[in-house]
Image (tube, rainbow, N blue to C red):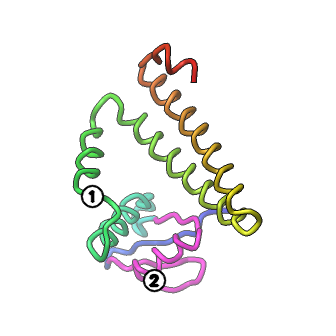
């Protein structure tokens, strides 16, 4: 399945090439929420500007209603920019969100069968995946685990 192409024109309008119509940023956000893979390109230069548009959607979402990111959290993220761990931190966040999404899907799927068993299984898998992910993160950062960490 290929990405749905959205073109951004100099007049700041977004054009959905699949539906052959202009869409708003709110409609684009809704497509993303529905799981649509999108790619936004500048109509003039054909440059991929997906990240810029996604950041714009996040900014608008954060400005209205209940924000997802606290000021403290944003400050911590900013501190990683330009540092030696920037790339590692980005991959860590991406893997964390992917894991969270997988767990969420699994809970939805298994909750109807036996909620207690489903939650217990998810918690156990979650702990193992988080432990593995932290080991990979620290290993990539050049930090050796302590003796007690190696036993777990």
Percent across and percent down for residue 133 are 53, 35
Give residue 37's position: percent from left, percent from top: 58, 64
Tell me if mark 1 has few (under 14), some (14-19) or many (20+) residues whose alpha carbon lies within 10 angstroms of its own. few
Q: Position of residue 41 (x, y in %)?
A: 45, 64
**Which quadrant would residue 53 be assigned to in this image?**
bottom left
Residue assigned mark 1:
70
**Residue position marked by numbered label 2 in the rendering:** 23
**What is the x, y in percent for residue 19?**
59, 83
The magenta span reads 12-40
Residue pictured at 37% horizontal, 69% vertical: 57
Say few, some or many: other residues with alpha carbon within 10 Å of mark 2 (under 14 / 14 to 19 / 20 or more). some
The furthest residue to the top: 147
Q: Please tell me which residue lies in front, 103 or 121.
A: 121
Residue 15 within the magenta-colored segment of the rendering: yes
Residue 65 higher or lower than 116, as above or below = below
Callout 1: SS = loop
Which quadrant does the C terminus fall into? top right
Direction bottom: furthest residue: 21
Q: Is residue 13 magenta?
A: yes
Q: At 49% across and 77% down in the image, what residue appears?
A: 30
Closer to the N terminus: mark 1 or mark 2?
A: 2
């Amino acid at each position: 399945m290929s990405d749905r192409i959205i073109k951004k024109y100099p007049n700041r309008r977004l054009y959905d090439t699949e539906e052959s119509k202009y869409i708003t940023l709110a409609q684009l956000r809704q497509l993303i929420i529905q799981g649509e893979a999108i790619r936004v390109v500048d109509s003039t230069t054909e440059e991929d500007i997906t990240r810029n548009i996604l950041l714009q959607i996040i900014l608008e979402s954060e400005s209205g209603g209940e924000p997802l990111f606290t000021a403290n959290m944003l400050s911590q993220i900013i501190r990683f920019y330009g540092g030696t761990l920037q790339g590692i931190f980005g991959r860590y966040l991406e893997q964390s969100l992917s894991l969270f999404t997988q767990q969420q899907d699994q809970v939805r799927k298994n909750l109807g069968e036996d909620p207690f068993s489903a939650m217990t299984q998810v918690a156990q898998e979650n702990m193992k995946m988080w432990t593995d992910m932290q080991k990979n993160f620290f290993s990539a950062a050049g930090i050796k685990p302590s003796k007690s960490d190696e036993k777990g």
